[in-house]
Amino acid sequence: MPRILLIEDEAAIRAVLKDILRDQKELALEVAEAKDGAEGLALLESSNFDVVFCDVKMPKLDGMEVLRQAKEKNLAGNFIMISAHGSTEMAVDATKMGAYDFLQKPPDLNRLLITLRNALNNQSLVRETKALRKRVESKFEMIGQSAAMQEVRQMIDKVGPTDARVLILGPNGAGKELIARSLHQKSARLGKEFVEVNCAAIPSELIESELFGHEKGAFTSAIKQRIGKFEQADGGTIFLDEVGDMSASAQAKVLRALQESKITRVGGERDITVNVRVIAATNKDLKKEITAGRFREDLYHRLSVIVIKAPALNDRLDDIPLLVDKFLTDIARDHGAKRKTITKSALEKLAQHNWTGNVRELRNVVERLVIMSGERIEQEDVSKYL
């Protein structure tokens, strides 16, 4: 049920607005009232409202001040300001402060209702966006309290706020991407793009175009200009996953990008300045790759300003109960089903396994157990389906 707050010092106008809102049966609105700005702000601090109709000229605290404090404290939904003495300048000021709309007294009924419906729809979209963002953040949340994970978190806390390049080492499935995203979340680049490139998944003949873009006609299939990942990440972070699989020519261009903060599109002649933070990851021993002539030593030193090691799951078995708990919650939400429980003996059985596929393997096993077991996952289920 949408909740509406009326902040208006004139009782007669409050009564009229309240009757109008309550007549909108299809919206099923719950309406609260405040006789002045101070009372309205107190209600906003104690309850959540979807839309606030707020008079501008009021005793104790005027509407613009209520709006300012509410936005500073992130208290309310959409503010619709109302004034009998409004001006274009006042409307512009209110909008700059975060008001959704500005209405003149007495408000036109159709305009008021249209504005209300739009504000409610907007607030619904805001809630959905927040829920989606929370779900995405949960997907990339780092789970674990083991000594190995505590060390990784300490490194992220120190390195994240800087622009230092980071090389993340570790086996497949150990969570290297989660570390990279956590570094981005801790940085001043949060709010800018986090662009991921899986260097192993892109054919060697296309990797340069993928990273740096190309001009129209640069090669047979280049029918139009394309912006590369480095340009997409300008101002943000680029994550070069499986960087050890990058071709020699691409390595040379990445090295130039790191040295000069410039790139050139394939088939282009113009240098393009980019401001990106580079985080790389690999499951390979790059020093052995250098010895074998497959990886540039100068690029290695450019990338490895800071080295973070993602621990294998076998090195953090104490984290299995926490990981399983998160996976059970995520899987239940994704499947739209009731969350299953798991017995202590089943968890102990999981801890005895050799997790060559690391956290990724554990997640797949938990999903298999959720699908194949009864309401509760028992030790016998683990023995049968692991």
Image (spheres, helix red, strand yellow):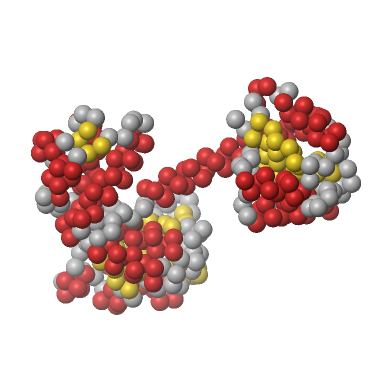
- The percent position of residue 16, horizontal first and vertical second, equals 82, 30
Q: Is residue 202 above or below residue 32?
A: below
- The percent position of residue 226, horizontal first and vertical second, equals 46, 54
318 or 207: nearer the viewer: 318
- The percent position of residue 195, horizontal first and vertical second, equals 42, 57
Q: Residue at x 20, y 58 (%)?
A: 316
Q: Which residue is drawn at 76% across and 55% down?
A: 65
- The percent position of residue 163, horizontal first and vertical second, equals 44, 72
| Rendered image quadrant of residue 340 | top left
In which quadrant will I find the N terminus? Answer: top right
Q: Which residue is drawn at 52% across and 40% down?
A: 128
Q: Is residue 226 above or below residue 370?
A: below
Indicate left or right for 355 with 18 as reference: left
Indicate left or right for 153 with 1 as reference: left
| Rendered image quadrant of residue 126 | top right
Residue 84 visible in the snapshot: yes
Indicate left or right for 113 with 302 as reference: right
Indicate left or right for 301 with 234 as reference: left
Q: Which residue is drawn at 61% across and 42% down?
A: 48
Q: How many marks?
A: 0
Residue 232 visible in the snapshot: no
372 or 256: nearer the viewer: 372
In which quadrant will I find the C terminus? Answer: top left
306 or 35: nearer the viewer: 35
